[in-house]
Each structure stands twice: as C-alpha cells, then as structure tokens.
Amino acid sequence: MKPQPVPPLVTILLDSAQVYVGAHGLPADDWMTQAGGTPAEWAFCLQSVRTGRPYVVTDALADPRYAGNPLVELAGVRSYAGVPLPVPVTASVSVPVGGEPAGRRPEGRAEGRMSAVPARMTSMNDAPSLTVLADQAAYAAAVQLAVDAAAAYYGDGTSPLDDDAYDRLVRGIEAYEAEHPEQVLPGSPTGKVAGGAVEGDVPHTVPMLSLDNVFSPDGLTRWVAGLERRLGRQVTVWSVEPKLDGLAISARYHHGRLTQLVTRGDGTAGEDVSHAIGTIVGLPGRLAEPITAEIRGEVMMTTEQFEAACEKRTAHDGTTFANPRSAAAGTLRAQDRPYVCELTFFGYGALPLPPTDGSELAERLRTLPHSQIMDLVAAWGVQTTAATPVAGIVAASVEEIQARIEAIAAARAGLPFGIDGIVIKADLADDQAAAGFGSRAPRWAIAYKLPATEKITKLIGVEWNVGRTGIIAPRAILEPVELDGSVVTYATLHNAADIARRGLMLGDSVTVYKAGDIIPRVEAPVVHLRTGDEQPISVPRVCPNCGDGIDTSQERWRCVRGRECRALASIVYAAGRDQLDIETLAESRIVQLLEAGFIADFADLFSLKREQVLGLERMGATSTDKLLAAIEVARTRPLSRVFCALGVRGTGRSMSRRIARHFATMEAILAAGAEDLQAVEGIGPEKAPVVVAELAELRPLIDKLIAAGVNMTEPGATPGGAATTAADGADGADDGTEAAELPLAGMSVVATGAMTGPLADLSRNQVNELIERAGGKASSSVSAKTALLVAGEKAGSKRTKAEDLGVKIVTPEEFAEMVAAFL
Ligand SMILES: NC(=O)c1ccc[n+]([C@@H]2O[C@H](COP(=O)([O-])OP(=O)(O)OC[C@H]3O[C@@H](n4cnc5c(N)ncnc54)[C@H](O)[C@@H]3O)[C@@H](O)[C@H]2O)c1
Ligand SMILES: [Zn+2]
C-alpha cells in the first residue's frame, strides 16, 4: 500500500494570545489563527473571521513570498490518514514562517506546544474552531493543559486561558479522541462535569450537571429534532432563559432558612461554601415561606459589584480581578480575606430536599413545569431573571425560541451582568423525565452559546490622543484579538486615574471586553500571568497635540488650550472632500485665518469678510473670490455632509448619511433621544448616548451654523426615514411606497475597483452616497448579505468573494443605468 502523504509539520502554540494576521498583506479582519506569536512569526490563518468561511489555501500560494514555505505542501494535501479532506484544505491552522517562534512565552505558564495537521472541518454552519492535535504527545499535553486550566478556573478563577481558548482546546481533544478511541486518557476532560478537574465532599441529592452546547439556529433545530425523536413526540412547551455567566451553586433551605451552600464540584459532590451566606444579593437568609427545598442557580458579580471588588482588592494588595466571573469564583471560596465582596444570585431551579422529599411541596417540584417552579422560587423571595430585561419565557415553537434568543442576544451588551448564552429547556416535567440525563448534561436542556465577549490578549502600548475639546485620553494598543466578530487592536482606557486604579502595566496580559457595538475596553490585567517583564505605563507631561501644558485637576485631563488645541484639525476635517468640500481652502490658509483671529471654528468660515481674506498674506483678489465662492457652495451642502463635518465621535461618512437620511433635518436630529437614534442602522445602545452627548456639546457650534444660513436638510429624505417606515404599514404608507420604488431599496451594495463610464469622476464616498440616495445601503465588504457588487477595473478579492458567494455583479456602466435617476 502506498504510504499516506505526510502532512507538513505545523506548530500551534497553546497560548491564550489570539493572533492577528497581516503578514501576508491581507486585511487583518479577514482572518484568524489559533496560535500565539507575532505577525512576523505566523503567516497564515485559514478561516475568515468575518464570514466563518474557510480560507482557500491555494489562493495564497500564488504569493511568491511563500514559495518554499511548508504551506506549499499543505496545499497539496487532499487527504490525511486516509480521510479525504475537503478540497482545498480548510483547517484553522497556523504555519510559522522563518523558523519557530522562540522564547516568547512567559515562564511558569501552563502551556503545551504541539504539532498540528489540517483538521477536517465539521459542518461549517455550526463549526466553532478547534485546536488541532497532531499526535499522541500533543494530545497528552492538551489534556494536561485543559485539566490544569479547568482546576484554576473553577478554583480561584486564575486560568491562563480565556473561555474561547479553553473551548477550542477541549473540542480539539474531543476530535482527537473520536479518531483515536484507543488512546483516550483517563484524565481527559471530555464528557465530565467541570472537565473532571474539581472535587467535593458534600454529595448532591441529584447530580448537578453541565449543559451541552449548540452554536447556530441549525444546531438548535437539529437538537430539538433529536430530542423529539428520543421522546417519540413533540415538545409543546419550552422555557427560554439567559445563560448566566457565573458559577452554579446549590442553596439548601430548611424550614425557610438558608442552611448550606454547596458548589457544583464534579457534579456528584461539591464543596461547602456556607461561609458566603449573607454576602449574596438575591439569596435571602430567610424565605417568605417556611419551606424546605434546594434551590439551584448561578452566583456571579454584576458589573457594579465587580468594579467595587476590584477597588477593594487594589486597596488591599494593588491587584485586581481579571473579570467578573473569576472574581466571583475567587470570592465565593475565599474565607480569610480582610475585605468582603458582594455577590449576586439568580435562581434557575428548585428540587425536593431530604428528609421532606415525600412532602406535598416535593411532589409539586417533581411535577410542575419548570416555568411554574421559577414562579414559586420568585414568590419565596429568591431572585430570578424575571425582573431583568432578559426574563425567562415559555415558547411553543423553534421559531419562538429563536426570536427570544435574538432578543436576549441583542440585550446582552446593555445588561448589568454577564451572560454567555441562552438556555433552552423542555418545560414540562414529563418531557424532562422521559429525556433523562447523560453523564455530563441533561438531555432535555441545551445552551445556545453566544460568541465570547471577552478574551485575554497583550497590552503592547498606550497612546494618548487629544479630543476635539482638548480632552487627553489614553488608548490601549493590543496584540490583535478576534472578539465578537471583529479583530480588536485598540481599546478604551478612560483616563490616567483609570490606568492607575486598574494597576495596568505595559506587557500585561489583559482581559478585553467587547460586545456588539460597544467600543472595546480593557477590563483588567491578568495578574497571575505576569512574568516580571512588565513595565510601568508612562503618562505625558505635555499635550501630545500642541506641546502646551496639561490641566490635571480633573480625572479627565485636558490640554490647557482646551478646544483651541484641536481647532486646526477640526477645521481641516470639516473642509475636507467628504465633508463640506471647500476646494481652495488649504491647511496653511486655515492656519493663517486662525492666527489672524478671524475664525475659531469652521462655522466662522461662513461669516468671513472679503477684506479679511484679502488682507491675508499671499492672497490676491482672484483667489479670495474663489475661496469665498467655494464657501458659498459649502453653505448648500446636504445635511449628511454638514453633519459629517461636525466630527461627532463614531459617525463617519456612511453613518452620517444614514443619520441624515433617517432624520432628514438637523432639527429632528437634535430632538432625537438615544432611543430614536437606535432606529438608525449601526447605532446600538452604547453608541446612541455617546452621539446624544456629543451633539449636546456641539450645540453652540450647530447654532452658529444655522445662524450662518448653512443648509440643514437632506434632499429627498423625509423625517422618520423612508427606509424605516417602509415596513410600518398603514400610516407609513406614503413613505413606504417611495422607499419601495427606489431602485436599490433594501439592498446592501458594495463598490470596488476603479469606476468607469458615468461614474468615472466619483470618489468612493460619492459612489456610496449615490447608492444610499437610490435606497441602498453602501457597504465596504462582501458578505452573504451583499445583494450587489459594482465591480470596476482591478476589482480583485472582493470580486472573487462575490463570485464564491453567488452575489450579483455589475459593471460601473450597468450600475449607472440602474441608478440613472439619481446621478
Ligand atoms: N478559561 C478556562 O480555563 C476554562 C476552564 C474550564 C471551563 N471554562 C468555561 O466553562 C465552560 C464549561 O463550564 P460548565 O461546565 O460550567 O458549563 P457551562 O457554563 O457551559 O454550562 C453549564 C452551566 O450553565 C450555568 N447556567 C447559567 N444559566 C443557567 C440556566 N438558566 N439554567 C441552567 N444552567 C445555567 C450553570 O452553572 C451550569 O452549570 C466552558 O465552555 C468554558 O467556556 C473555561
Ligand atoms: Zn494641546
């Protein structure tokens, strides 16, 4: 028999750092890798972060830089160990370029180093990525790492891995075990509660299990079908609840009194943590009724409790907790801390407790639907999610479950506590009893996992930026990390005091948080991962923009020149091509005008006198009149341009267009509250209040613009937004028809390559404006949601991607015809 093709050796570092890419010159947000290291050390990652689609290896091979690289061989691998690989190879594997990365890993850190081979991807729909294990040694190292990490995670919360890295590792172990059942180690974490890493000495009356996971609507549908097949009937009632991100705990009440708290442990026995009684909000020492029962639920820290706990710990030993979950884990078990941190409890179950398991209550707890048991628990005075925006509900169909999943996922970023998914349970006791339990999880419940919102990465730098009002704010530069659908390289650090409070140092491993629209933020240093090489973060002594002094009397530092510090930059921006487009106004001219005291902001441009301009050095009559004429034209620009010129944080060109089209007038924008703003696509619960606050701050400038007669309306738009009212039915009917008649209504359109024909002279921004005038949504990246690609000359990778996805492609000329009325 012919030997199998030998797969190239690829190295994967089991490091918590999630790397970047960029070394191969492709957009960083397109790719992900599984490994640690720096961009110079790693060249490829083979799965698109944005689309989850596998990367086509052969594409990259055309690049001469990779000639002779092991990857060349990788591309030739069509099967491994006799199993055909999807062609071409599609695993999440990274390949080192130019030798192995060495010596970067901190000492004393749980890690394994293993060779890896391309994995066969499971169904891409539902495919979370996994760490690929090449051989038995790699497998053994992975098992050891996972068990150590889990022990630290459930112990004092000091795991070296973030959850995503841990989950990928365990999935890799599972995949390896499926291929090599004869090699499974007894210590393997798979199939065990808490990965088999924790023990306890207080037996549970009924095992406290974990939950199995799904990751997509398809996964959920399959799970439901599987359960119904097992039961031989349809499940008619489901309960849908948030999956609280803390630790499971059992609270034993005797005659209404809380007598014992026990952790989940290995599922059959846990640890007694009764010392925490009295410190957990939502878990009363005495119930409203003198009942005897066991209540199960999640112990966690709210964001507020986490901040308070960090403050206490910093005061005590100068360190913080890495995140709310590990703070809760550490706090629950800590007995001899000189400070007390408050915890929060949410119940999600109740069961009979011996010796009263023959009682009438015990019988009710065995036969009532889960949802009604939760009502009972709340009535007894225990906190449940009922009072939160993500309350548990019952659903009758997969569609209803799915709708609730979406609602909970949308609410996640605004919640005062962490959730990491949605738990779906068969609500009726009969269904639960008939489905029963596996060794690790019940068969009648499933966790629908949401993407991780937190990861561990490295803080590699801090830069100090001066805002429009002269506020000097630090920003963290991170080793790029893929988080909730995008690659994060920068994160907010509020101010110098905040850096000190969190005890951050350069080179620290840090937890970074991002969900939905939220601007990523650094949560805390992971103190137990320090190597001793971390350096203090230096703070500026003078304004980084103008070199003048800094007013440090407030927590938010400010340049002593205040608004003036940034005046030049703001006016240059406002006059720019995509904003007011004042053609002859060069930066040097703005400097002259500022220095002469004729202007202090861009609104002053509109009241410039001819003599003033004429009096400037190197300014003749012709150029003066040209400039004044250009300013006259600027006075009539559409609202979207004027709004963009304001430079409201988080609103660039396309967002400004969307806002202007939605509200139609500046008056309506100014009257809008955070709620109203969220009706604009791309503005979420976090961004909306920022925009409102910025606009309040900009109000004097806006009033000045209005007084100067600058246009404040968006041509063709009606208040309320034509596109939004389209779906509104009756009273939106007029607008609705209008929107539906627009040639690109409801379409996401991407333009790429050089425009030709009637579009030849348009900038990309102008093409995007055109798309939006014609009712479409301009986007810069091709995805499954793209309805149309306008591909000019040299369209490149976007065109390839559109072809792959079956997106309709037109030439600039064809497009010009489609939108001729709007040109
Ligand atoms: N970072 C690490 O080193 C590390 C180590 C081990 C585990 N982990 C993380 O922990 C996860 C596995 O932990 P797990 O076994 O506790 O499982 P899990 O957290 O995935 O799910 C089970 C748990 O969900 C909780 N839960 C929350 N809301 C619930 C609700 N409404 N109803 C029922 N249960 C609810 C319960 O505590 C239950 O035990 C992994 O996926 C990983 O993300 C991380
Ligand atoms: Zn300054």
Image (cartoon, rainbow, N blue to C red):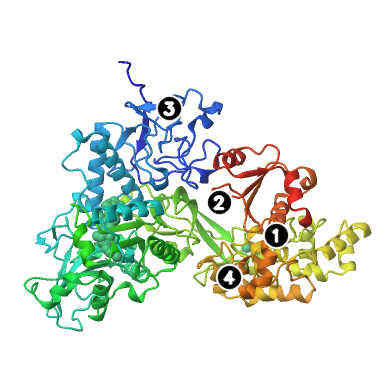
Amino acid type, callout 3? Leu
- The label on residue 74 is 3
Image mark for residue 742: 1
Q: Residue at x 37, y 41 (%)?
A: 122
| Among numbered discs 2 and 1, the one appearing first in the sequence | 1
Residue drawn where x is 45% and y is 40% of the image:
38
Q: Earlier in the sequence, mark 2 or mark 3?
A: 3
Q: Residue at x 51, y 37 (%)?
A: 23
Amino acid type, label 4: Leu
Quarter-of-image position of residue 698 = bottom right
Give the image quarter of residue 798. Answer: top right
The answer for how far apart the CA atoms under marks 1 and 4 are is 23 Å
Q: CA distance from mark 2 to mark 1?
A: 19 Å
Report which residue position mark 2 lands on. 785
Q: CA distance from mark 2 to mark 3?
A: 31 Å
Up-down relation of residue 645 to residue 134 (above or below)? below
